[in-house]
Image (cartoon, grey):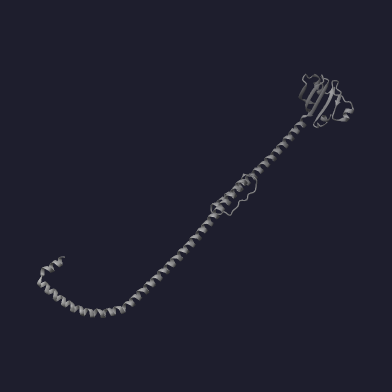
């Protein structure tokens, strides 16, 4: 009875073979003990051979869609009928609602696709811009993207790469600074050593000059005394030389062969 009462567009009832209505959605009609033995659809149901029949008939001025079924050894009949215009109006309304629902779903899908594509293209554009900055040497930039797609994972990986590059560059710059400082300190040490060497050389040179001047000064009185001694010795030597020369001259005259042998020896 509950399943029969939910039907709104069709008239449905259950009757016996004599045409007495056993079940009807309208309780007031059921209490009147109506009969359907004169209903053309009931009469056609009595003569049908199949258990279930669906047909289209014209009753009066209306086109009617009917469905009939029988059971319990052809003692019980279930007959449902509905106006064709009402049925097709329902189909039309259902089609309209389905089309409207489809348009709404399509619009939502297009909007979601647009938002998703915009999010992806925006994130990709931000990534490309940051990559260009990094390629120019700017390692202070961090990429911050919105969303939960693969571009966010890519951005996190890119940020980690930037961090590693920055640490490597800072370490290299620190090493270069330390190396420059060591080179500077070593250069200063070498300059200091060179300056000390120059000072030592200059001191030695001054010492040498002073020693030379002292030797010259000490040698002057010795030369004067030597000159006087030399003059006296020269005078005596001149005399001795003259005497010796006379003796040699006489010896040569006496024995010239002896002089020749000495010269050869």
The quarter of the image holding the C terminus is: bottom left
Q: Residue at x 77, y 22 (%)?
A: 52
Please tell me which residue lies in front, 86 or 127: 127
Estimate the x, y position of residue 93 in percent, counting from the top left: 74, 35
Nearer to the camera, 151 or 105: 151
Q: Is residue 133 visible?
A: no
Relative image position of residue 202 (x, y in whole percent):
40, 70
Choose between 6 and 156: the one closer to the eye. Answer: 156
The x and y percentages for residue 195 are 44, 67
- Give the residue drawn at x 80%, y 22%: 70
Q: How many marks?
A: 0
The answer to whether 124 appears left or right of 264 in the picture is: right
Is residue 151 placed above or below 203 in the rendered structure?
A: above
Most extreme residue toward the right is 32
- Name which residue lies at 82% across and 28% down: 12
In this rendering, position of residue 197 left or right of residue 90: left
Depth order, front residue of 66/249: 249
Q: Quadrant of residue 233?
A: bottom left
Percent across and percent down for residue 157 are 59, 47
* Corner quadrant of residue 244: bottom left
Quadrant that contains the N terminus: top right
Quarter of the image where one finds residue 240: bottom left
Q: Is residue 98 visible?
A: yes
């Amino acid at each position: 009875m509950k399943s029969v009462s939910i039907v709104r567009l069709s008239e449905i009832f259950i009757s016996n073979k004599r045409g007495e209505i056993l079940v009807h959605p309208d309780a007031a009609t059921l209490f009147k003990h109506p009969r359907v033995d004169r209903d053309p659809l009931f009469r056609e149901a009595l003569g049908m051979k199949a258990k279930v029949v669906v047909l289209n008939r014209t009753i009066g001025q209306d086109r009617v869609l009917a469905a009939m079924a029988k059971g319990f050894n052809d003692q019980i009949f279930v007959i449902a009928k509905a106006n064709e215009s009402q049925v097709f109006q329902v189909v039309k309304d259902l089609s309209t609602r389905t089309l409207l629902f489809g348009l709404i779903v399509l619009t939502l899908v297009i909007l979601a696709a647009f938002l998703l594509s915009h999010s992806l293209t925006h994130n990709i554009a931000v990534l490309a811009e940051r990559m260009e900055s990094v390629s120019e040497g700017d390692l202070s930039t961090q990429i911050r993207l919105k969303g939960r797609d693969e571009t966010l994972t890519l951005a996190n990986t890119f940020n980690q790469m930037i961090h590693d590059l920055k640490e490597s560059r800072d370490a290299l710059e620190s090493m270069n600074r330390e190396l420059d400082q060591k080179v500077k300190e070593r250069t200063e040490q070498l300059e200091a050593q060179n300056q000390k060497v120059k000072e030592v050389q200059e001191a030695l040179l001054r010492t040498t000059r002073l020693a030379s001047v002292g030797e010259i000064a000490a040698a002057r009185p010795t030369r004067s005394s030597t000159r006087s001694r030399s003059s006296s010795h020269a005078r005596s030597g001149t005399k001795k030389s003259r005497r010796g020369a006379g003796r040699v001259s006489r010896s040569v005259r006496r024995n010239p062969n002896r002089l020749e042998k000495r010269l050869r020896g």
